[in-house]
Each structure stands twice: as C-alpha cells, then as structure tokens.
Amino acid sequence: MFKRGKKSEFNQDNRRLYMANMSHEIRTPMNAIMGIANMLLSQVKDSEEREHLSDMQTATRNLLMTINSILDYESMLDGNISINNAPFEINELIDEVTSIARINIGDKNVHFLVDADPGLPAIMKGDATRIKQVLVHLLSNADKFTKEGNITLSVFGKADDETCKLTFVVSDTGKGMSEDIISRIFLPYEQENNTASRDEGGLGIGLTIGKALVERMDGRIIVDSKEGEGTSFSFTLSLPILCADEACKINSPEDKYVALYIPNKDEEAVVSHLLDKLGVGHVSLGNIGEIFVEDGKKKFTHLFLEHSKFIQIKDVSELRDLGITFVDFIDSTKEVVYDHNTLYVKKPVWYKGIADVFNGEGITGELSKTETKETISIAGARALIVDDNDINLKVSQGLLKPYGLATDTAGSGTEAIRLINKTKYDIIFMDHMMPGMDGVETTKAIRGYDDAYHRSVPIIALSANTIEGVEALFKSAGMNDFLPKPVEIGLLEACLKKWLPPEKVTVTTIEYTNDSTQTDNKFGGFKYIDVTTGLTYTNGNADMYNSLIKDFSASIRDKKDSIDQLAEIEDVGRFTIEVHSLKSTSKMLGALSLSEKALELERLGHKRDIQAIHEKLPSLNEEIDKIIMDLRSFSVQEEAPIVKRKPLDREAVRQSMRSLFYAADDFDYDGAKDIISAISIYNFDDRLEAVFEKMQDRIEDIDYEGTRQAAVEMLAML
C-alpha cells in the first residue's frame, strides 16, 4: 500500500514535470513561428500571401491557447487550481477583456457590444486574472459559433455596504444549442458533433476550465440556449468591496443632451442604456434632419453617430453651425481619416469611452497607428476632372494619382464637352458651381447626345453644396453619384470601385501609418491655419499639402481683388461662385475661419442680399489678410524637431508594462513594439533607461520571454 502510494505520487510528479517541459518545448518553436510571421507581414504586399500569414498567426495563437488550457486542465484534475484574491479595478478588468475580444473578433460581420453598469464599485477584491480567463474563454466560444449578429458582454451588480454580487453575462446570436448539447457542454473535449463543428474548432476544454474556475471562486456558471437563436453564459461572484465609489462618473450630466444617430438598433439600445445610467438626457434620431427640429427640450450638446453616418454628414456646415460636438464611433480594425473637429470612441462602446468624451478626455483626431488596409490600384482607365478652380483641379489630380488613374482636366463645361467628344473617359468628376455652363447644365448636355457612351459614362458630382435636396438635383440631371467637397478618401475609393470597370480595378492590402502629429510638425509658423485639418483633406500627403499652400498663396490676392470687384459692380451670380470656390479651397487648406466667412457670404449671394454682402465683406477681407500674413511665414522644416521627453508618469508606465507582459505572452510582436514605442516619450532615470533599452533589444530579437522579464523588472522598479 505504501509502495503503491509512493508510485502514484511519483507518477503524478513526473506528469507535472513532463507537462511543464512539454509546454516549454512547444512554446519555444511557436515563439519563432510567430516572430517570423510578424516580420513577413510587415514586408509582404501580396494579399493572398498576407492571408496565409494571418492564418498562420491565428493557428499559432490557437495552439498556444490550447497548450495553456491543457496545463490548466491538468491543474484542475489535481485539484491545484490556485485562486489569488487581490484588489482590482473593475474598469481595468473590462478594458483588458474587451481589448482581447475586439482583436479576436476582428472585422467579421459581428457587432461586439459591451453593456456594463458605470455604478459598479470601483475597486473590489478577487482574482481578476481568473475572471478575465473565464470571460476570454466564453467570448472565444461565442466568436466561434456566431457568424453574424451580436456578441454582448454585460456586467452588472448588486451591492450592500461590504459585498458586491458581480454578474457577468456573455450572450450571442449564433447557432444555439440543443438540450442534449447543453447537457454535455462542460465535459472536456466535447464537441457538438465530430464533423459539423470542425470549422469552428469545437468546444474543447475552455468551457470545462471556465466552469472549474468559477466554482473555485464560489460561483456557478449557467447556460441558456436555443437552437437557431443563440446562447447565453452567465456567472455571479460575491466579492468584497474595497472602494464603493462609482466606477465611472461624469461632470454635470444635467448639462448634456445627446442626439443618437446609430443605425444598428442593438448598439443604439446599449448606448441609450449607458446614457440613462450616467444621467444624461438623449434622443434617438430617425434621420439627421430631426436634429434641427425644436422639441421643447434643451439644445443638443453632442451628436453620437456611427462612422458610416459620420462620413456622410461631417462637412454639412448647417450641422457644424449648431455648435454640437460630433462623437464618431469607430472600428479600430478599419482605416479612419481623423477629423480635427471631432471626438472618437473606439468600439465596443462602453461607459468609459463615453465618460471620457464628456469629461474632456476623449480621443481626438490625432491618433497614430501602423495598420493594414485595403486600397485600390487602377490600370488602363482615364478620368476627366471638370472644375473652374485651378487649385481644386490640382488637388483632385493629386488624390487620384496614387491609384494609377490617368487624368485630364477641363476648366469649364464647354471645354469638358469638347474633350468628352474627343476622348472616351471611364469616369467624369463634375464640379457643380461654375461660371457660364455649370455642372448640372453640362451633364444634361452630355446626356443629350444620342449614343451609348454619352448616355452611360459615369458622371460624379463634386460639390461643397451639401444641403438637403442637392443629390436629387444631381440625379435628375443625369449624374450617377455625388462626392461632397473636400473629398473624403474612403468615399472616393468606394466611388472608384463602384463606377469604374471591374477589370481595371485591383484591390490590394498595404501597411500604412496614420500619424497626423508627425506630419504636422513639418509645417511651422501658422497662427490661423489648422494644418491637421488640411492634411486630412490631402489624405496625409505632406507633398500635396505643401503644393496646395503654395498655390493658395500665389492666388489668394487675385481672388480677393476679384471678389471685391464683383461686389462693387454687384454681379451677384459671379460673386457667389467666387466665394463658393474660396470656401472650398480655404477649408482644404485648413483656414477654417476664412471658409466659414466665405460660406456666410455665399448664402447671402444665394439670397441676393446686396446690402448684407457689403456689410459682411470687410470681415472676409480681414480674414484673408490674416491668412496672407500666415503664408508669409510659411516654411517646411527640413529636419525633424528635437523631441523633449516628458516627465515620468509612473502609473501610465505601470499600465503599459502590464499590457506589454500580456502582449509578449501572446507573441504579439506589433502590439509589444507599439507599447515600447509609446513609453519612449518619458524621461527615465539611469536604471529605468537601462531596462528600457533591454526590452527594446529583446523585442527586436523577437525574444518574447526576455521581453516579459524586462516588463516585470521595470514594474518592480516603479
């Protein structure tokens, strides 16, 4: 008996040792595979090859998760699952879980929603690592079996003076499960069948481990599911409260009033619920025009909207005139051209992002991140750009040049018709307001020819006039589509893909860096010109923006004289066209105040209010003089400025080191590089500087274990 017990103990010890060694032996080559895949992704441009590399990364991460799960399962069998209760912040826990889930879900046709109660206690005591582990398993399972619809993480609680009963719910609109599957769901290595679930990867042991962890924390996990409708997992933990302050509060909620313009009703319901919890009044809009309707309540302070809606209405001056703060909900997996006058909340939207907006801590249009995006290249196609403004022609040509689209230009409707009769174009970009024959009249003339080419060539309206009804005017004239000026790159690319012959358009995946701050630093000396806005309208192209500044500088005095002369002779028609043109070009430059004053005069021109024009014109001229003074000091800095390091923010660096530890543990090369780069702004002492340099070297060598150790070392010093 004694010998049998000794032998069993010996075998158990051997098994543990074997599992530890196996984990190390497998993780080491996985380390190399992940590193090589990351390096190749930064170099390879071919979309099919990039897809294979992404598949390699996903498979490797899944294998690593399986290895970790096996080790946890072994510990569970031995009864050795450890629970380490310690203080944790609920905000930090939710943030880390949502970040991981957002990356895993990626750009699938699935909405990831987070409905968390901002009134939860700020700090509780429990094993945050184990709670996160359970939630990641549940969210991963939901991701596997949900191809479209929603995955929702809900967090709420019921607290007394000392304890909070904290409930987590992960629900999805996936395929659901039968009663038979539910009865076996928590058994190890159990799949709903041996063939159908292979695409999803099966249920494995993640749920088994999750159930064991919840029970080890004195909770119980509950599953509710119906075939064809989805599944919900929930568990509740009783946790001691260490700080009863609300997890999230906003300043003066009674002063806020929000308009919601969110097409996804489930997301709108979550945001509406969060605003209710934060004590902020709000109204859902069926269409954007409802924002102008007086409803007897206080005026709107914020407009919350989906990015697809934002790019449609962001340049509608009537909306900007209301003084409302635009808040754009963006998908971090997709390209966004950031607008300087807008605040951003990254999806999934939860109370922290919304509170940051209200408390003045929201994300502005000055983000920098290296990402991959889809773009297009065009071969064998030719476009005609019609505009009476030379600067607009140059900007339009500059925007189309990177795609490989050959372009011709016409300065008037008459010239456009002459060129169209001589050359067969694949697409025509037509300005609206031009002297003589305007864009609508020119389009009608083109469509009047009795042949297939003139009747079918795609004509795209380009106009800074975005008032209601203008699109209907363009369509009735025979135009196919409409792009508001200044042109937004995402809309331009969508237009090219839609209207050019498919055989002439190739979609590719490239790597890009969206860094407005670095480019801004190249332009100095401006007081009245907003460089960030200007660069937005040139798609971040500094050379194009440089050229735009020079062209504007060379023409602005003549433009001012022309406007003055037309006002003096009271030629209201041509005056209105000139100030309309100035409104557009000055906005592209970033001279926003000048653009607004030109817009005001354009409106007076449409009303033919001669007296008001004479009253307002001096104000426009004063603004032009300011811009001319700004342009005199224009210089492009040839060398990058010396960047002074900021004082050390210990808490920010601590948080970064925790994130770096997890990034290295997940073999996330790009994530680790980004984190290390982000803390380089701080002024470290000699000891911390040495560790910082060490972690830079380790990640460059793709040494994830060394990077983790450096993160722990720096944490210990802070």
Image: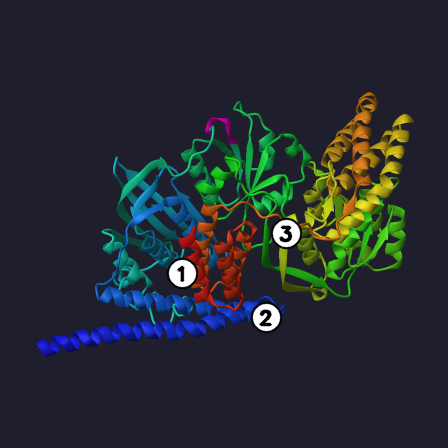
Residue 645 bears which disc, if any?
Answer: none
**What residue sits right under mark 3 in the picture?**
515
Q: Is residue 654 visible?
A: yes
Q: Are marks 3 and 1 in contact (CB under 8 Å)?
A: no
Name the foreground residue: 301 vs 713. Answer: 713
Q: Position of residue 151 (x, y in %)?
A: 42, 52
Q: Determine which quarter of the picture holds residue 466.
A: top right
Circle 2 SS class: helix
**What residue sits right under mark 2 in the picture?**
48
Of circles 2 and 3, the one toward us is 3
Amino acid of disc 1:
Phe
Label 1, label 2: how far apart the Cα atoms are: 25 Å
Q: Which residues are magenta?
A: 253-257
Circle 3 SS class: strand
Name the foreground residue: 26 vs 371. Answer: 26
Amino acid of disc 2:
Glu
Which residue lies most toward the front here?
A: 686
Say which quadrant the N terminus sits in: bottom left
Residue 145 bears which disc, if any?
Answer: 1
Q: Position of residue 682 (x, y in %)?
A: 54, 49
- 47 left or right of 73? right
Residue shown at 56% from the left, 26% from the top = 299
Name the foreground residue: 364 vs 683. Answer: 683
Amino acid of disc 3:
Asp
Q: Position of residue 561 (x, y in %)?
A: 89, 33
